[in-house]
């Protein structure tokens, strides 16, 4: 199949993907025309933002489904997405939108990726609200340039105003753009026509703003319009990720108290700064695999440290068309922010895993880490996790980064069953037994 893709002209592949997308929509009766579709796109924060919106709307009585990296949900029914695709292909998206409609949902949240858009998986989906989180270099080899990557993300926003305005539950649904104004790329997404544009962020220019953001031991506190919010999730960045849920709740005139309850009641986003163990040392599994998310994760880890304790991180970098320039940057960031680092593999695809490890490690040594003392290269991920955990002492914080809650690892062309959280628990049990 990979060989056929290489020799097939691009326009024929486009026609193939476009045809499948529309055929799926026709087969299932264009379910998105009868649902309020909320698309969430950006480089990072998509999954957490989608989770907050899904949880908040359901909490406020607006039954909502979700299709994303981790889960596919119909109302409160949540099932793991084991397809290793944020935007599933062929008929799967339409089938699940149909399930949501049949299950009584009024809305659906869809994590919308550049790769999914490139393969026309968004076609046959009529979007109503487009949420932009941020944009940083990613999938550059696949798209050819950062400008092409941005243009691919923009398509949903560009097509928003040209799609028909729906009536759902006897209510006309406006076309709305919701954007993180703190991102320098926001103007590129806010420039498109829509019925309404609403911004969020930490800066004073935002329509909805998170203020006084404080990292606590087991969560984050902040204020919105003088109302106190307490999230049961690690990471200051989650204050930002929660804001679109508040905005969308206001758009549909849902009870604010219920929206806030939904946001505060979200105690876990699988694989996103997820606490696997609290004591004697804390172990956190996170999806971070590029500059901004790694910086944010390590910053949160440092804020959790007590006097004299250390931050330990296991990291790698994905292959398969990801931007290789991330590798030395990741090594430098980890070297500067973590006390101890273990460099291992996550998803090399067909890239040389040892080269990935070396690219990260060499940058770390240039930044001051010393191999065998505070830097360890361990190609096998399970052994790497074991080493990171065995280094920890009471009070330390260990961050296992790169895979989050993904259920498989791509090694070559083979999908290998995997879950960092399960592996961490298994290795912790061995340490305790030892």
Image (cartoon, rainbow, N blue to C red):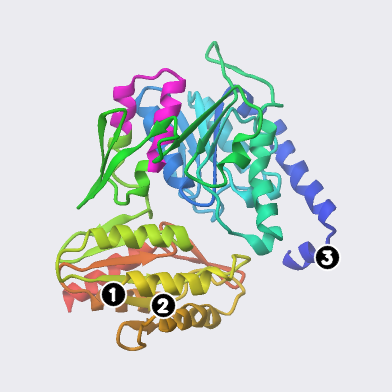
Q: Earlier in the sequence, mark 3 or mark 2?
A: 3
Which secondary structure, mark 3? helix
Is there any visible trace of residue 257 in the rendered image? yes
Foreground disc of the pair 3, 1:
1
Q: CA distance from mark 3 to mark 1?
A: 48 Å
Taking the spot 37% from the left edge, 75% from the top edge, the residue there is 335
**Residue 14: image location, x then y, percent:** 78, 49
Q: Quadrant of the N terminus?
A: bottom right
Q: Which residue is drawn at the image coordinates 53% and 68% (left, top)?
A: 326
Query: Does any portion of residue 122 appear in the rendered image?
Result: no
The image quadrant of residue 255 is: top left
Labels 3, 2: front one: 2
* Residue that badge 1 annotates: 339
Across and down, in percent, residue 292 comes to 45, 58
Magenta region: which residues? 240-262
- Of residue 214 and residue 385, the one placed in the foreground of this image is 214
To which residue does mark 3 refer? 7
Residue at 32% across, 71% down? 338
Report the residue marked by disc 2. Answer: 343
Mark 2 surroundings: few (<14), some (14-19) or many (≥20) residues within 10 A: many
Magenta stretch encompasses residue 14: no
Foreground: disc 1 or disc 2 = 1
View extreme (bottom): residue = 372
């Amino acid at each position: 199949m990979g060989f056929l893709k290489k020799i097939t002209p691009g326009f024929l592949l486009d026609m193939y993907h476009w045809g499948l997308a529309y055929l799926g929509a026709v087969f299932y009766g264009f379910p998105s025309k009868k649902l309020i579709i909320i698309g969430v796109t950006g480089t990072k924060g998509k999954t957490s933002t989608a989770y907050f919106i899904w949880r908040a709307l359901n909490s406020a009585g607006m039954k909502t489904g979700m299709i994303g990296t981790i889960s596919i949900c119909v109302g409160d029914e949540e099932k793991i997405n084991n397809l290793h695709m944020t935007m599933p292909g062929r008929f799967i998206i339409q089938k699940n939108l149909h399930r949501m409609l049949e299950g009584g949902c009024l809305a659906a949240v869809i994590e919308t990726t550049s790769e999914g858009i490139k393969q026309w998986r968004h076609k046959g989906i009529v979007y109503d609200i487009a949420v932009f989180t941020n944009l940083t270099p990613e999938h550059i080899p696949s798209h050819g340039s950062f400008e092409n990557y941005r243009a691919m993300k923009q398509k949903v926003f560009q097509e928003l105003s040209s799609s028909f305005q729906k009536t759902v539950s006897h209510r006309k649904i406006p076309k709305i753009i919701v954007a993180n104004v703190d991102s320098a790329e926001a103007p590129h997404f806010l420039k498109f026509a829509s019925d309404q544009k609403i911004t969020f962020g930490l800066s004073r220019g935002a329509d909805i703003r998170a203020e006084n953001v404080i990292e606590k031991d087991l969560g984050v506190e902040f204020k919105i319009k003088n109302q106190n919010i307490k999230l049961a999730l690690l990471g200051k960045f989650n204050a930002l990720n929660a804001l679109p849920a508040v905005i969308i709740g206001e758009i549909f005139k849902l009870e604010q108290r219920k929206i806030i309850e939904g946001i505060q009641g979200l105690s876990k986003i699988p694989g996103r700064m997820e606490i696997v163990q609290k004591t004697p040392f804390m172990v956190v599994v996170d999806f971070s695999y590029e500059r901004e998310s790694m910086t944010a994760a390590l910053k949160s880890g440092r804020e959790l440290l007590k006097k004299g304790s250390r931050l330990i991180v296991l990291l790698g970098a994905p292959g398969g068309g990801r931007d290789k320039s991330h590798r030395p940057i990741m090594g430098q960031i980890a070297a500067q922010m973590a006390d101890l680092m273990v460099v291992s593999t996550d998803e090399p695809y067909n890239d040389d895993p040892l080269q990935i490890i070396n690219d990260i490690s060499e940058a770390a040594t240039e930044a001051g880490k010393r191999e065998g003392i505070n830097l360890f290269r361990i190609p096998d991920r399970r052994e790497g996790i074991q080493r990171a955990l065995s280094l920890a002492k009471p009070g330390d914080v260990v961050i296992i980064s790169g895979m989050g809650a993904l259920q498989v690892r791509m090694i070559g062309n083979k999908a290998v069953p995997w879950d960092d959280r399960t592996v961490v628990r298994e290795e912790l049990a061995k340490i305790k037994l030892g």
